[in-house]
Image (tube, rainbow, N blue to C red):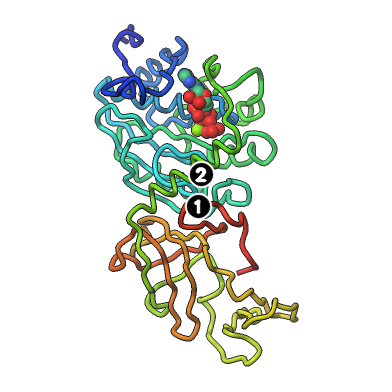
Amino acid sequence: MSSGWAGTWRHPRDKGMTERHRPTPLEIPAPWYRSAERILAEGWRRIMVVGATDRGKSSYCNFLVNALLSKGQTVSFVDADVGQKDVGPPATVSLADLDAPAELAQAPCHALYFVGHISPIAHFLPLVLGTRRMAEAAQGEFVVIDTVGLVQGKGRVLKGFQIESLRPDALVCLERGEELAPIRHAARHCNLLRLHPSRLAAGKSPNARRRAREEAFQAHFRGAREMDLGLKEVIVQRTSLFNGEPVEDPRFLYAERLPDGLIAVAGGAAPHALERVQVLPRHFADHLLCGVADKTGECLGLGIVSGIDFGRRSLALWTPVPKHRIRIVQFGDMYLDRHGHELHLGRQGHF
Ligand SMILES: Nc1ncnc2c1ncn2[C@@H]1O[C@H](COP(=O)(O)OP(=O)(O)OP(=O)(O)O)[C@@H](O)[C@H]1O
Ligand SMILES: [Mg+2]
């Protein structure tokens, strides 16, 4: 195995940038180089990176992806950190296939899976499923997977499911002290690479995190247009509404019969509790973040619901995805305005 990575590898973010735009250069501790050498020497193809918030998971992924690329390998990056993303918009798992060194934050997104929320809490199923789907779609000889920073409590359970689902060839644990010990213990059948964070790893404030998400949403929705989608033509997923049998009910603006009761939209006043009826507020879907997919179910991008016309049975959606490609709309679990501001972080009613 050749040595001297530190001399040969240069981060692409250091190239072609003016002094003013140059971000803090990555500091690469010697064990990080050794981990890359070992991964290449052992031929470990699927690498999952875990660590608490702000330990430098994304920085390590950036390093490892580019270190492998600089050795002539093709590398895929799966960005499964739904909140703080390098590739693609928040609330998704995304995939970038790379064959030349690139700053991950500038890498093109080749595939997406809509998770529906910027937090993993209460969204384990789409997060685990989406990460697996993206890892399977990856074209690179190596696949590097970034994960969310939730590693305590339920986060441990999530990491366990992700390891079961992905079966990584190596698990990189970026940790201070013993903070990942239970995750490592439950994964001691895997090849484990335990690394210290860089001394430059620093926390980001909640505001900085929110701003980063806003900018990422804004970038995704640049060039978006509003379009009307007929609810008979388009399949609406991840909701009971629009999957029942429409019925006339003078009490409501709109109603559908489901095998277990009615789901209805209130005409005006606040919905009241009725037995075996779920009543939604009139504007329950306004600003709802959605995934938009083609007829095969491949996510093409995001949309924001502008409104629903129940008389015409149409959904007004603001999205950068061309209308002729949209066949499926997947309801998410959060609301967003067109500037990428997060409005409500939970559904306005049970649908
Ligand atoms: N090796 C490094 N060299 C220079 N800066 C670093 C390094 N590692 C981490 N940092 C800095 O520390 C901060 C957190 O790093 P990073 O975003 O990579 O962590 P993370 O674990 O991916 O965080 P998150 O939990 O938000 O996903 C960033 O500002 C990053 O620039
Ligand atoms: Mg990160």
Taking the image as shown, residue 130 lies to the left or right of residue 101, namely: right
Q: Which residue is drawn at 47% across and 68% down?
A: 306
Quarter containing the N terminus: top left
Q: Is residue 256 above or below residue 1?
A: below
Residue 349 makes an appearance in the image: yes
Decide which of 56, 50 is in the foreground and name it: 56
Horizontal side of 54 relative to 97 (left or right) equals right
Would you name the residue on which mark 1 appears?
Answer: 115
Residue 332: x and y, percent? 52, 59
When asked about the image quadrant of residue 272, the answer is bottom right
Q: Is mark 2 within 8 Å of ligand 1?
A: no
Within-10-Å neighbours for mark 2: few <14, some 14–19, many 20+: many
| Rendering coords of residue 162 (x, y %) | 53, 40
The residue wearing badge 2 is 82
Mark 2 belongs to which amino acid?
Val
Q: Name the quadrant of the C terminus.
A: bottom right
| Image-based side of 37 in relation to 148, left or right | left
Secondary structure under tag 1 reads loop
Closest to the observer, 161 or 343: 343
C-alpha separation, residue under disc 1 versus residue under disc 2: 8 Å
Residue 43 x, y percent position in the rendering: 35, 24
Depth check, front residue: 3 or 269: 269
Q: Which residue is drawn at 51% across and 41% down?
A: 211
26 shown above or below 253: above
> Outermost residue, front direction?
20
Marks counted in the figure total: 2
Q: Nearer the viewer, residue 260 or 146?
A: 146
Callout 1 touching callout 2 (CB < 8 Å) = yes
Q: Can residue 191 be seen in this view?
A: no
